[in-house]
Image (cartoon, grey):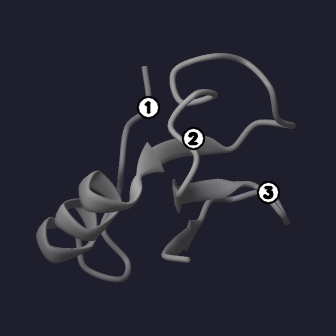
Amino acid sequence: MLWAGLNRPGIGIHGSPVPEPIGRAGSHGCIRLSNWDAATFYTLVGKGTAVTIR
């Protein structure tokens, strides 16, 4: 699973093989993406890049 950690331990942006929960609250703060979207995200954002979540 692709994973980008945020500034809180255990919270990050990551891919998910299960599409049903994507876009719905159901975790402790993670942002779930489809595995395809997560792979695209990782090609666009390098380590240390600031990401704003709105």
Q: Earlier in the sequence, mark 2 or mark 1?
A: 2
Structural distance between the alpha carbons of marks 3 and 2:
13 Å
At horizontal 87% and vertical 37% (from top left) the residue drawn is 28
Instruction: Return the mark for residue 31.
Output: 2
At horizontal 48% and vertical 76% (from top left) the residue drawn is 2
Q: Could you say which quadrant of the image residue 45 lies in?
A: bottom left
Give x and y (percent) for residue 16.
55, 55
Label 1 crowding class (10 Å Cα cut-off): few <14, some 14-19, many 20+? few
Q: Is residue 6 above or below residue 33?
A: below
Structural distance between the alpha carbons of marks 2 and 1:
9 Å
**Residue hosting label 3:** 8
Give x and y (percent) for residue 36.
26, 59
At horizontal 85% and vertical 65% (from top left) the residue drawn is 9
Judged from the image, the secondary structure of the residue bearing numbered disc 3 is: loop
3 or 2: mark nearer the eye: 2
2 or 1: mark nearer the eye: 2
Judged from the image, the secondary structure of the residue bearing numbered disc 1 is: loop
Residue type highlighted by circle 2: Ile
Q: Is residue 44 above or below residue 37?
A: below
Determine whether, in the image, residue 43 is placed left or right of residue 2.
left
Q: Could you say which quadrant of the image residue 42 lies in?
A: bottom left
